[in-house]
Amino acid sequence: MSKIVVFTEEGFRGRTAEFKNNVRNLEEKGFSDVISSLKVIGAPWVAYYDKNFAGKQRVFQEGEYATLDDKGMFSSLKIITDDLDNPEIQLFEDVLACKRRIKGGPGVITINHLHQERKTDCIQNCEKEHNISVTRY
C-alpha cells in the first residue's frame, strides 16, 4: 500500500505521521508548515504549499528525502493515483472558443468547440496560428 511518512525535523527525526490518503489541510493533523523530511512508499505524492491542494507544489517519487530545500512549506498532500502509462495533455487557448486536445502522439490534434456557430472559424484560426492541419470529427 502506498503511503507518505512525514517528519518535523531533517534526517527523519522529530514528530512523525503516516498518511495513506489525501490530506486537504495538514494543520488539522498538526503538520502544517513543519515537514522537514519525508519517505514515500509506493505511488508518488504531491505536496502543496497551501491547503486544499492549492499553491506551489512539489512531486515526490518513491524514496527517502532526508532534507528538503522547501522544508516547512507544505500545507496539503495528495497521492497520485492516475495511470501514467499513457499520458495526455489538454491545452485551452480560449475558454469560449477552442479547446485543443493533444492525444496519443505527435500530430494528432482534435478541436472541440463550446459555440457551434464559431467552430469553423476556430479551426481555421488554429490551423493558421499553429501551422497545422486539423482533423474534423
Image (spheres, rainbow, N blue to C red):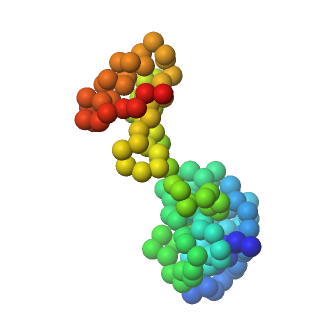
Q: In which quarter of the image is the N terminus?
A: bottom right
- Residue found at x 37% / y 49%: 106
Q: Nearer the viewer, residue 86 or 58?
A: 86
Q: Is residue 68 visible?
A: yes
Where is residue 81? Give x, y as percent: 65, 60
Occupied quadrant, residue 83: bottom right
- Residue found at x 62% / y 57%: 82
Occupied quadrant, residue 25: bottom right
Q: Can residue 77 be seen in this view?
A: no
Q: Which of 109 and 39 is in front in this view?
A: 109
Where is residue 80? Give x, y as percent: 62, 61
Residue 58 position (above or below residue 97): below
Left or right? Give the position of 131 relative to 32. Answer: left
Extreme-top residue of the structure: 117
- Residue found at x 48% / y 70%: 70
- Residue found at x 52% / y 65%: 59
Left or right? Give the position of 62 relative to 124. Answer: right
Where is residue 92? Give x, y as percent: 44, 36
Residue 12 position (above or below residue 32): below
Q: Nearer the viewer, residue 88 or 73?
A: 88
Where is residue 120? Give x, y as percent: 38, 18
Q: Which of 47 and 73 is in front in this view?
A: 47
Left or right? Give the position of 20 relative to 12. Answer: right
Q: How many labels, in total?
A: 0
